[in-house]
Amino acid sequence: MFSYRLVHAREFPSLAQGMAWPDLLSPREEKILAGLGHVPRRRKWLMGRAAAKRLVCDMLGEGRVAEKKISVLN
């Protein structure tokens, strides 16, 4: 089975500005984001994390796990 999830910057204005919404990132991811300086790089990094976390949440079922509990790491 193959699934995909698209996340558009226009849906999430804070991500487009390089800022995460509350409870999106795990503590480890927050440290990584703090080290990313340029807004375009932060935006790409955040959009990838948001898409991956939404996909995992979709597959597990709504409300089964908080996005903050999922870490997407290289």
Image (cartoon, rainbow, N blue to C red):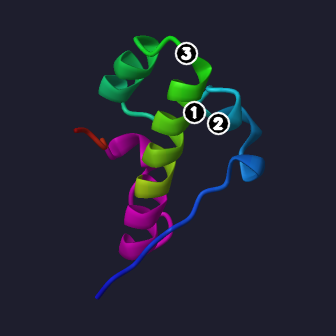
- Disc 2 + disc 3, Cβ < 8 Å: no
In-image side of 40 versus 13 (left or right): left
Residue 57 appearing in the image: yes
Residue sitting at x 51%, y 26%: 41
Determine which residue is flagged by label 1: 43
Query: Which part of the image, by quadrant, shows the N terminus?
Result: bottom left
Task: Tell us which disc is closer to us: 2 or 3.
Answer: 3
For residue 45, above or below residue 48: above
Mark nearer the N terminus (2 vs 1) = 2
Tell me the chief SS of the magenta region.
Answer: helix
Q: Is residue 74 magenta?
A: no
Number of dots carrying numbers:
3
Residue sitting at x 35%, y 24%: 27
**Dot 1, crowdedness within 10 Å: few (<14), some or many (≥20)?**
many
| Label 2 element class | helix
Tell me where residue 68 appears, x and y as whole percent. Answer: 42, 40
Disc number for residue 38: 3
Q: CA distance from mark 2 to mark 1?
A: 6 Å
